[in-house]
Amino acid sequence: MKPRYFLKCYIAVIMATALLCSFQPAFASTPIDGNEAPGRKMAKQAVKGNARWTTTDHSQHKVLQQDFKTGEEITKACISCHSSVETQFHTTIHWTWRAKGEKSNITYGKAGDSVNTFCLSGNGMDDKGCLKCHVGWNKKGMDSKINCLNCHNNSGFSFLTAFSDIKSFFEDGDPETNEIIPDIQEEIKDAVTSVAFPTRANCGRCHFYGGGGDGVKHGDLDSSMTEPNKKLDVHMGIDGQNFSCTRCHTTVDHHIAGRIYTNPAVSERRSLIDDDMAPKITCVSCHSDAPHKNDTKMNDHTDVVSCQACHIPTYARVLPTQMTWDWTTAGKLKDGKPYHEDGPLGKPIYKSIKGSFTWEKNVVPEYQWFNGSLKSTTVKDIIDPGQIIKISSPVGAESDLPALIYPFKIHRGIQPYDKINKTLAAPMLSGKNGFWTTFDMNDAIKHGNKALGIPYSGKFDYVKTAYAFPITHMVAPKENVVGCIECHTRKDGRLAKISGVFIPGRDHNSLINTIGLLAIFGTLGVIILHAIGRIVTGKNGKKET
Amino acid sequence: MSQQMVKTYLFTRYERFWHWLQMVLIFILLLTGFEVNGFYSLLGFDTAVNIHNLTGLTWLVAFLVFVFWLFTTGEWRQYIPTTKRLFTVALFYAYGIFKGDDHPCPKRKEAKHNPLQRLSYLGLSATLLPVQMVTGFLYWSYNSWEAWGLNFLNLQIIAFIHIIVAFAILQFVIVHVYMTTTGHTPFAHIITMITGWEDLEQDEAEEILKVRNYKNQLEQIQKILAEDK
């Protein structure tokens, strides 16, 4: 065959291969314009009909047209129709604040043996200060009735203030102020019929203010998420999908999907195509595990990297979040009185009742392997005070297949522990015996531990602690995702501390590279010498003629 | 010894095309590959990866065509290694070249490569390039390993082999480029690879012509025999 036929054949083969590749998306290189990423398309399809409907109009119900004197009366009215609500709700963690978990002898939860790096312990609901976020009426915890309106009323009306006004006017006995009571009751009647599915504001009332203030706890949940724009959260943005929390935190019998202490939100990541009754709590539920366009490298990452790791470049993007809390400085007084100091971000950096804080905005997460479960150190666990105590930390041995690399906010604390028993302390904070009244930590621990039934030796010191919060909200628009180079880089990449996975661009073998470079420069050296030799001798394989 | 130079057609069009295609592809692969390894930041990691992958796949296809050409034309014989005069050639480059000795193994149509070239090109084509293609393909298809039952593989080891061979290929390229300057003029070999024509000294050329004549005669005999049938 003549050479030119080979050339033709060669070009033909290349063309044919290119043609074949265009049908085989795994081989193709250029994205096809106007072709939406499949994961996006799927999710849009899944949430297409998002208007919820109802067969009842609560303003028509006679039972709601009473002159309510207390919140409990409203609850009774609710239960008169919604007869199973107590049986359902009383078993949920929103009511009990207690959860079963990793270890059978430990009750997890705010009202259980769990501790955090903020207000430390709920002291089994004995610390009434914590109960303003409990779903019972008037900080009475599980002794009261469920405050249904807390989650199911979107009027914005303050029922608690209204009822406390009514109560004080009654007790007052003044006929003039008593005349106001019917007016307030009229307002209550108007507001009580605004029954709705929980809005972001409903959930946010507690979850945005966890840790004792706006944005203290989570980093990806604060009051900026009540009415976020798409740039802050693509799902909840009011200029976009406008999701409520329960759009993903789907509910069965008042049990809301999501992680509960050591228990993962789901045992496996499944899409709605695999199981249409699965909770929509994971990204995979709606987006599948291969959401990107077929011809992109990104889908190849989903076996190791969580969606959140790239799609939430930073958290606390609008409001600052608290990063550290040091209890050792708590209790300083000015002229015998507690005081507080504000820092540069407009947030307190010192409070006599709580100690010192630092805050940050637009924070780059820390990354760790995470299989959905968290490990918890409770008041019942023996600690090693020489170490930083991981009060809450992700489970995810590097070899665990289901574990992925997730972003976390790590809140760091310095907090009291029992020096002799080597356990974390659970001081009482509010109330007459609480630290916020007495400023006596030893006494506060005595009362707090007693409420939990945990022995206290009488000697305490402070220990460094860390609490990991998975970052999963504040998903940014695709334009703002984390770029490849932020992890695939030799120095100071986001995943610099992640081991157990080979990351091209980050990982290399210094020995191989050193030997390789030596070989290259050695070769160049030899060549240069050889060339000089040829030039100097002036001969190049040719004898002089 | 002043021989008259005779022009001889040494490299066919496909051979030259393949050579320069290799050059371009290897250049791109080395440039982007070392960036992916983290030596420098030039195109940006993602661009480097995309270009590297696309170039690598193009290479695989082109190499298959080369293998096809090699065996259909019988040119693979050019790569049969020989120890005969291997040492002599090595000695020439190490010593004789400075003295002005003649090359001990001048090019011939039937032996385009001297023993040293044969050995190094065979090493490249039969060892380095295949290892690089296999490891490169595995690196690229990392997410399919499970489906293909290749879970015993380790990405880190694959990547390390890939980079070791990349260094070896770079080393080859450096030496190879330098060796092109050892022709009777510094650019003679390069020009040959562009035009296909090589200036050979007359007695070498005559030798080639003899062989050619013999070949032509053989073809004519075969033709006659065929016609007789």
Image (tube, helix red, strand yellow):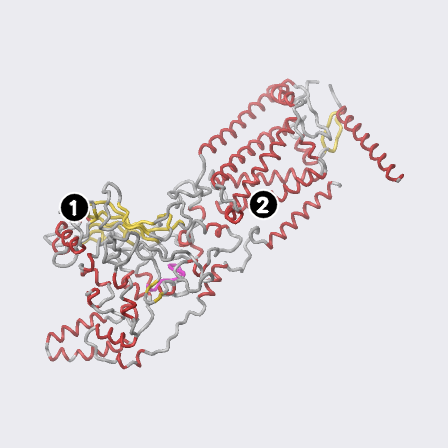
* Element on which disc 2 rests: helix
Q: What residue does disc 2 label?
A: B57
Q: Is residue B47 left or right of residue B64?
A: left
Residue at left 76%, top 23%? B203
Q: Residue furthest right?
A: B228
Check disc 1: other Cα within 10 Å, few if <14, some if 14-19, many if 20+: many
The correct choice, above or below, for B205 with respect to B99 in the image is: below
Amino acid type indicated by mark 2: Leu
Instruction: Return the mark for residue A460.
Output: 1
- Residue A241 in the image, given as x and y percentages of width and height: 41, 65
- Residue A46 in the image, given as x and y percentages of width and height: 45, 65
Magenta residues (range): A226-234
The correct choice, above or below, for A33 with respect to B194 in the image is: below
Q: Nearer the viewer, residue B173 or B61?
A: B61
What is the spatial separation of the Cα atoms under label 1 and label 2, in whole angstroms?
A: 66 Å
- Residue A136 in the image, given as x and y percentages of width and height: 23, 67
Residue at left 21%, top 50%? A356
Residue A330 among those drawn in magenta: no
